[in-house]
Amino acid sequence: MSVPSELYYTKDHEWVKVEDGKATIGITDFAQHELGDITYVELPKPETTLSKGNEVATIESVKAASDVYSPITGTVDEVNESLDASPDVINTDPYGEGWICTLKDIVADDLNTLMNAEQYEAFLKEEK
């Protein structure tokens, strides 16, 4: 199971990467594995302001539907529209082409409440 070291993680299995004042959000390799084959992603609307913990997207799979929550506060800047045609890319590349959205105007202090890769790996071991 892949856990990239440059990302931050939530206990709900979302990840966030911050570059140049923007945050990219997605779900972890663990989450996509648990969901199974992803069949649909309901994306957020651009310019939606989200507080940390707000629902940002819904992912449907052959097993279940699951909400995705924003790991940090910000405004939706861009959504990954390619997921409309190929939602299963989250299964094959959750940390790359399977990103869900980007946020601008982020509250960087929210990152202090998230786990780094080492902490997330330890959390996953506790979950099992």
Image (cartoon, rainbow, N blue to C red):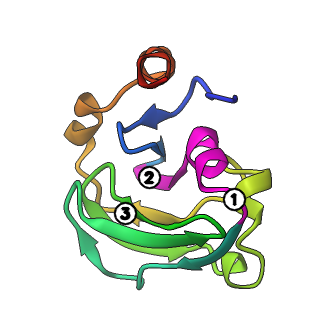
Specify which label sits upstream in the sequence, 3 or 2. 2
Residue 5 tag number = none
Q: Answer above or below: position of 41 versus 126.
A: below
Quarter residue 77 falls in: bottom left
Query: Amino acid type of disc 3?
Result: Lys
Q: Nearer the viewer, mark 2 or mark 1?
A: 1
Q: Are marks 2 and 1 in contact (CB under 8 Å)?
A: no
Query: Amino acid type of disc 1?
Result: Ile
Residue 104 tag number = 3
> Label 2's element?
strand
Q: CA distance from mark 2 to mark 1?
A: 18 Å
Front residue of 124 and 89: 124
Q: Answer above or below: position of 58 versus 24.
A: below
Identify the residue at horizontal 49%, vertical 55% (top origin).
25
Q: Nearer the viewer, mark 1 or mark 3?
A: 1
Front residue of 115 and 107: 115
At label 3, counting other C-alpha atoms closer than 10 Å, the crowd grade (few under 14, some 14-19, many 20 or more) is some
**Region in magenta:** 21-37
As drawn, is 13 to the left or to the right of 69? right
Residue 36 is covered by the magenta coloring: yes
